[in-house]
Amino acid sequence: MEGCKQHHSRFWKQLLDWARRGGLREFPWRVEREAYRIVVAETIIRRTGADRAVRPYEEFLRRWPSVEALAAEDDLAVAAFFRQLGMPGRGILLRQAAERVVREHAGVFPASRRDLMRLPGVGSYIADAVLCFAYGIPVVPVDAGVARVAERALGLKSRCARPWTDAELRARLCANVPSDCVRVCAYALIDVAALYCRPKAGRCTTCPIGEVCLSLQKGREVRVVPEL
Ligand code: SF4
């Protein structure tokens, strides 16, 4: 167990070092601490991916710059905005969540996972993104990419068909995340998944956490893409 803890500490340190050397991708929502903006960004990213989310994110915030502005809008206008992203229903849920935050939480997104997940359209990933990126609480939002790195690099095997929904994997991944820099650690993990640890093959020879990756050490599971 102690060895496991030490391995996790080295994993987070490697991610952090890489982030501090300038490895992270830059997106406008990554400098935000306001929960509303985090929820808007993550709602859009879930559909478009981060690279294609910048324009709709900025456009959305020009139209509805605050949770109060969104709460006062009608469903159809927000649905029309989200229709261009292929998810009109998401827009309605987001507006309803804003209305609930204004009515029941005085316009402030709650800092509790349970309360966040009671909001329309807010699932496990978005709730954890708010806790982590807005409030700095030491949890990591787990999507398919993050779960993939956790399985390959840390050996956190999941029995679930969809490992990113596995509460045990999430708990074990979050257990040793450094509490004083959780935002950077989470962004680094997301970016390693997106840039290096791809679903079908890893760019393992240049991966910033290759030194601590169990799959790479054991020479198994990940078909390594040779760097050109
Ligand atoms: S070394 Fe390879 S398998 Fe391990 S985390 Fe990096 S890309 Fe993924």
Image (cartoon, helix red, strand yellow):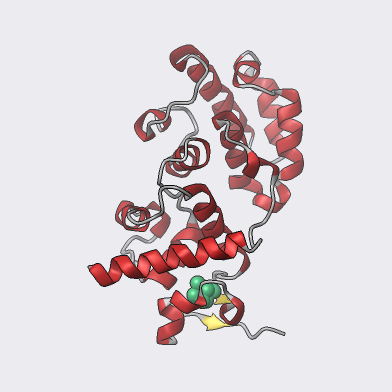
15 vs 127: above or below = below
Residue drawn 73% across the image and 44% down it: 54
108 vs 2: above or below = above
Q: Is residue 204 left or right of residue 104?
A: right
Quarter of the image containing the N terminus? bottom left
* Quarter assignment of residue 177: bottom left
Q: Does residue 191 appear in this view?
A: yes
How many numbered dots are placed on residues in this image? 0
Q: Is residue 157 left or right of residue 199?
A: left
Residue drawn 44% across the image and 14% down it: 104
Please provide percent x and percent y for residue 214.
Answer: 40, 78
Please provide percent x and percent y for residue 93.
Answer: 54, 28
* Front-lying residue, 133 or 57: 133
Quarter of the image containing the C terminus? bottom right
Residue drawn 38% across the image and 31% down it: 112
Q: Is residue 103 left or right of residue 151?
A: right
Q: Does residue 148 appear in this view?
A: no
92 vs 173: above or below = above
Please provide percent x and percent y for residue 48.
Answer: 66, 48
* Front-lying residue, 177 or 222: 177
Residue drawn 55% across the image and 64% down it: 17
Please provide percent x and percent y for residue 90.
Answer: 58, 34
